[in-house]
Image (cartoon, rainbow, N blue to C red):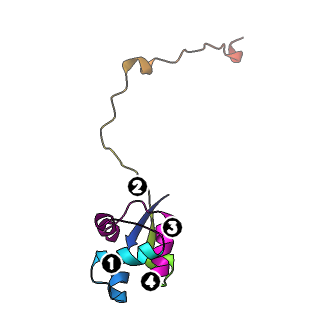
């Protein structure tokens, strides 16, 4: 059984709750924690990042005083494997597979 794991990046929601209006408002608090990012890097951070350093993640949690589970919402769903049934897509059997079975002749014990 497969498991589909998805996540939601909640930084824009967390920023709005804390009163941060633009992504550039994060530049100074991140710099105070030793993380230097450009305006474009911080902007991309508010979108769905594919990779993020643990140091940056810890700094964001410290800035907003939240846990990682409030910043990243993880959802998993079990997916049932479905078997595909194909009707009449099999190749016809070859004639060589229909060889006759060799007969064995056995004498009848009553004939003796």
Which span is picked out in magenta? 34-63
Magenta span includes 47: yes
Q: Position of residue 79 (x, y in %)?
A: 43, 62
Q: Position of residue 25 (x, y in %)?
A: 32, 79
Residue at mark 2 to residue at mark 3: CA–CA distance: 41 Å
105 vs 36, left or right, is: right
The label number, if any, that marks residue 12 in the structure image? 1
Q: Which residue is mark 2?
A: 82
The residue positioned 56% from the left and 15% from the top of the image is: 103
Residue at mark 2 to residue at mark 1: CA–CA distance: 37 Å
The residue positioned 41% from the left and 78% from the top of the image is: 29
Q: Which residue is mark 3?
A: 55
Residue at mark 3 to residue at mark 1: CA–CA distance: 19 Å
- Kindly indicate whether the residue at mark 4 contacts the one at mark 1 (C-beta within 8 angstroms): no
Task: Decide which of 32, 12 is in the foreground and name it.
Answer: 32
- Sequence order check, earlier mark of 2 and 3: 3
Residue 70 in view, yes or no: yes
Dot 1, crowdedness within 10 Å: few (<14), some or many (≥20)? some
Of tags 3 and 1, the one toward the viewer is 3
Residue at mark 4 to residue at mark 3: CA–CA distance: 14 Å
Label 2 element class:
loop
- Sequence order check, earlier mark of 1 and 4: 1
């Amino acid at each position: 059984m497969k498991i589909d794991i998805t996540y939601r990046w909640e930084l824009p929601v967390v920023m709005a709750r804390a009163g941060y209006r633009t992504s550039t408002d994060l530049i100074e608090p991140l710099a105070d924690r030793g993380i230097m990012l450009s305006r474009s890097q911080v902007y991309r951070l508010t979108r769905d990042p594919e990779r993020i350093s643990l140091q940056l993640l810890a700094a964001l949690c410290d800035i907003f005083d939240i846990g990682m589970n409030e910043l990243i919402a993880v959802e998993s769903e079990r997916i049932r494997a479905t078997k595909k049934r194909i009707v009449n897509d099999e190749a016809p059997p070859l004639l060589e597979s229909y060889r006759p079975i060799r007969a064995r002749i056995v004498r009848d014990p009553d004939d003796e």
